[in-house]
Image (tube, rainbow, N blue to C red):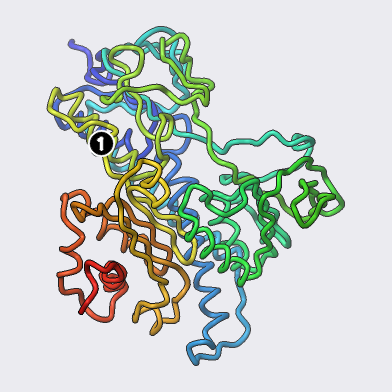
């Protein structure tokens, strides 16, 4: 008898079931390929299990609590607001299970030419991986192993029960006082989330401002909101030492201009939100002839191919922005590559992003600083988000809109938006940029009133060239 499809040599091996791995594997099967996909953890990768899905679900609950507490600003009086932390976490877990089950159904529905193996895959030779004692060989292998929380080097940290962005999602009870280390996306989202659920929160960051990679106006706007909500910000401080204390943890932090002697901070819980590191430490990269950079990320070319011919890598384990939508788009480009079709270049893509604080922080393209550092001839349109009619009517006035355009061509080069639904608004500009359109198209367009999107037009009209007579 001929061997079953599952037992035949695969055409492609995919390591990891993240946002690139699953759609790539199922599409390759639909195109006639025999595929093996391997996962050592829960199907769905970071996004489904401990990234986008659980965190944004919790953020929704936290926002509901915040809106209820502050509803009097809209003339609505609400009695004492009670956060049922167990119910909040149960809702989060139910939604995670829902999406994870969807991933599993998709793999099952792919048919007999897709073999799903649960286990840890590591290279033992070029284009050869071992899983559960079984060696698998394929002409093409795709690595989609993702990343995990990075652990900063802090004296005494090994002796402290610290949380990371995964373990904090499994807390059985709300922390009384949470110390958050970091000033980036994860740290900011988590700090506000737990503050709104009722915890006292102190955020400590080495950077002098929140979100140091963003436009300074964005950092300032978000910091003002955080302070207004009662989040204590210790910016421009390094954590020198961590130690256990009765009922929690203590951090010794460096001095600032106003506190030359440094300080000790005490909390009941410690959350490390200092970035992520690729899951390549146990991949067998050396045996697989796969080159890594100094941060452990897999080096790839414009076609996602690694130093070993026929082996490709996508998602959070390669250099570049670690976003779900980037990983998902990776699979689209790589699918064309593997099918021998013309494909976009990996670095030619325009990547919008959103930080799901409240207000949201969103951006695309070049910041004003980046554009000026490149010596570009630019014009910058800026307006407080609170000048938008819709923002005033909904009392969502915090934030700023900043749009950078080419002074000669009028094309949008980049944008930064801090405000309500900024994550939706940024796509107006990213789509315009992708189409190569002029900012004048947005200025001359009819935008419904009153909407937040109308504010983008109003911002551009702050420039003399677009001002009404």
Judged left or right of residue 14, residue 134 is: right
Helix, strand or loop under label 1: helix
- Image quarter of residue 72: bottom right
In this rendering, the answer to whether 291 lies above or below 78 is above
Q: Position of residue 296 (x, y in %)?
A: 50, 24
Task: Tell how many labels.
Answer: 1
> Looking at the image, is 278 positioned above or below residue 19?
above
- Left or right, 41 with respect to 175, comes to left
Residue 439, position as x, y percentages in the image: 21, 60
Q: Residue at label 1?
A: 348
Name the side, left or right, on which 298 lies relative to 31.
Answer: right
Q: Which of the 4 image quadrants contains residue 5?
A: top left
Residue lying at the far right in this picture: please name it.
Answer: 246
Q: Which is nearer the eye, 434 or 16?
A: 434
At horizontal 20% and vertical 79% (from top left) the residue drawn is 469
Residue 96, percent across and down? 44, 52
Q: Is 369 placed left or right of 327 in the picture?
A: right
The residue at the point 46 percent across, 15 percent down is: 285
The residue shown at (45%, 68%) is 399
In this rendering, is residue 255 above or below 136?
A: below
Name the one closer to the observer, 273 or 448: 448
Dot 1 surroundings within 10 Å: few (below 14), some, or many (20 or more)?
A: few
Please state, as top left, top right, bottom left or bottom right, where the N terminus lies in the image: top left
Query: Vertically, is 319 above or below 406?
Result: above
Residue 456, located in which quarter of the rendered image?
bottom left
Task: Identify the residue at horizontal 20%, vertical 25% (top origin).
Answer: 337
Residue 83 in percent (x, y) is at 60, 72
Is 352 in front, or is 101? 352
């Amino acid at each position: 008898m001929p061997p079953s499809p599952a037992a035949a040599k695969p055409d492609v091996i995919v390591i990891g079931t993240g946002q690139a791995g699953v759609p790539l594997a199922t599409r390759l099967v639909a195109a006639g390929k025999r595929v093996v996909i391997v996962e050592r953890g829960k199907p769905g990768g970071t996004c489904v299990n401990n990234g986008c899905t659980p965190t944004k679900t919790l953020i929704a609950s936290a926002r509901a609590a915040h809106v209820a507490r502050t509803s009097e600003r809209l003339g609505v009086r609400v009695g004492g607001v009670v956060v049922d932390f167990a119910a909040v976490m149960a809702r989060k877990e139910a939604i995670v299970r829902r999406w994870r089950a969807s991933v599993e159904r998709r793999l099952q529905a792919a048919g007999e030419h897709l073999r799903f193996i649960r286990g840890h895959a590591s290279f033992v030779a070029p284009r050869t991986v071992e899983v559960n004692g079984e060696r698998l060989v394929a002409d093409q292998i795709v690595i989609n192993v993702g990343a995990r929380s990075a652990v900063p080097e802090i004296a005494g940290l090994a002796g402290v029960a610290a949380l990371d962005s995964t373990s904090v999602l499994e807390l059985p009870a709300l922390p009384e006082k949470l110390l958050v280390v970091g000033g980036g996306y994860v740290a900011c989202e988590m700090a506000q989330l737990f503050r709104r659920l009722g915890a006292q929160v102190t955020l400590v960051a080495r950077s002098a401002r929140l979100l140091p990679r963003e436009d300074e106006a964005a950092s300032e706007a978000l910091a003002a909101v955080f302070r207004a909500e009662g989040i204590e910000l210790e910016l421009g401080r390094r954590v020198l030492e961590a130690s256990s204390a009765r009922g929690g943890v203590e951090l010794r932090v460096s001095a600032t201009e106003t506190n030359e002697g440094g300080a000790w901070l005490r909390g009941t819980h410690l959350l490390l939100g200092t970035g992520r590191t690729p899951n390549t430490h146990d991949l067998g990269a050396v045996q697989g002839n796969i080159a890594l950079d100094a941060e452990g990320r897999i080096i790839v070319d414009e076609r996602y191919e690694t130093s070993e011919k026929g082996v490709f890598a996508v998602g959070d384990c390669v250099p570049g922005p670690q976003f779900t939508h980037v990983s998902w788009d990776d699979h689209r480009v790589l699918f064309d590559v593997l099918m021998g079709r013309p494909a976009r270049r990996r670095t030619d893509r325009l990547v919008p992003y959103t930080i799901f604080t409240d207000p949201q922080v969103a951006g695309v393209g070049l910041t004003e600083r980046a554009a000026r550092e490149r010596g570009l001839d630019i014009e910058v349109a800026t307006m407080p988000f609170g000048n938008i009619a819709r923002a005033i009517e909904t009392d969502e006035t915090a934030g700023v809109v900043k749009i950078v355009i080419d002074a000669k061509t009028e094309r949008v080069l980049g944008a930064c938006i801090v405000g309500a639904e900024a994550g939706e608004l940024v796509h107006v500009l990213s789509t315009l940029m992708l189409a190569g359109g002029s900012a004048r198209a947005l200025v001359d367009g009819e935008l419904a009133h009153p909407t937040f999107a109308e504010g983008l037009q109003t911002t551009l009209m702050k420039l003399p060239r677009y001002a009404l007579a």
